[in-house]
Amino acid sequence: MKKKVLAVLKYMLFLSVGLVLLYLALRGLDLNLIVEEFKNAKYTWILLSLIPGFIALVSRSIRWGILISELGYSSKPSATFHATIMGYFANIIFPRLGEVARCTALNRSQNIPFNSLFGTVIAERIFDLLCLAIIAFVVIIAQFGFLREFLETLIWIPLTSKIPSNTWLIAVLGLGILLAIILFYILLRFSMVYIRKLTFYRKIKDLFIGFLAGITSIMKLRRKKAFLAHTLIIWGMYFLMSYIPFRALQATEHLTLIDGTTLLMMGTLGFVIPVPAGIGAYHYIVTKTLTELFGIVSESAASFAVLVHASQLVLIIFIAIFSFAYFLTRKNKPFNVKIRNHSEKNIES
């Protein structure tokens, strides 16, 4: 009972955060101008952006299938695809539930151990995180001038304006922070014996070990080229999902390829924040990026964020209907023998 209450409270908290961010994204904007943007939008470009969205979903499921096959299990491509969709749909309802949902769906339909499936998901997430870091590096190099001005205006100037100009006070604060760090380090060293016994420490340690195992498993892949090819396809499609909709609005149709890459990076951060389906977080980050970095009018920027987010959300929900039907009409596999182990035994005999 307590777990259910905590789950509901957690969901309400995440949803509240998303709604607050959505409010901040739309606060002070002229809703009539936003409605006008919707009326004048070229929806052909929005529909075209759904094609790379679908291709990314297919490619992601194939890439997951590669990792599963490396473990020695067989999974029908259709089952892997629909399980992937179930994961995306679950994230709409509850953030971070998608990973568990897609592993559960495939575990029940293909009888592959849940822990093995979850390990492949961790490996995927780690690799995608590395890809995002590479994209961020490219964007920082290409947009250095813009980003510096953006960060100065949005973060550095507001922060430094609140710091007192008294040199002695700043020196004392700096010394205090340094002493606090040293004290924390000393306490940590003496407390490690007790900290290692804590459940929280073990969870962090297991998570770190899982990250290392995930990276190692990718490095040992037999089908590295196929895995990397689908990774490039996925992120290429994500880029097109950000770039193609530029043509839908007059205010954004002049934006360039590197601008699309920048928006891809910033928009992805919106989905990293644990709110249902990135609602609010995506809108706030994309709106701020378009207005502060590219000088787009706030109403046009907000309209763009709403259109792109809503269209991709509709795509997921539409496909999820078929995914639900797929799992409801399929019988579960009675067992799933490890193909690699089985073939090795045959060779030995």
Image (cartoon, rainbow, N blue to C red):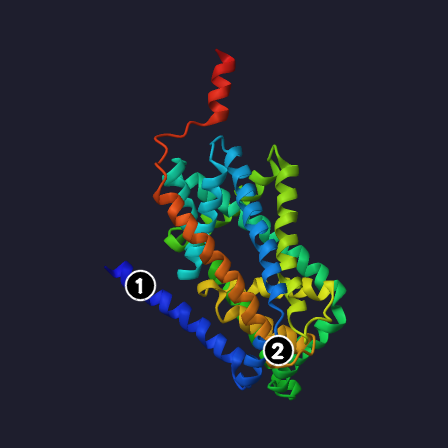
Q: In the current view of this chain or complex, which residue is farthest to the top? A: 349
* Image coords of residue 271 (percent x, y): 52, 62
Secondary structure category for the residue under label 2: helix
Lower sequence index among marks 2 and 1: 1
Q: Nearer the viewer, residue 211 or 256?
A: 256
**Left or right of 52: which side holds 139?**
right
Which residue is drawn at the image coordinates 73% and 73% (left, top)?
A: 146
Which residue is drawn at the image coordinates 60% and 67% (left, top)?
A: 43
Identify the image quadrant of residue 12. Answer: bottom left
* Image coords of residue 270 (percent x, y): 54, 66
Tag 2 residue? 300
Report the Cα–Cα distance between label 2 and label 1.
39 Å
**Left or right of 63: which side holds 256?**
right
In the image, residue 134 above or below residue 25: above
* Image coords of residue 241 (percent x, y): 62, 60
Identify the image quadrant of residue 304. Answer: bottom right
Tag 1 residue? 6
In the image, residue 153 above or below residue 244: below
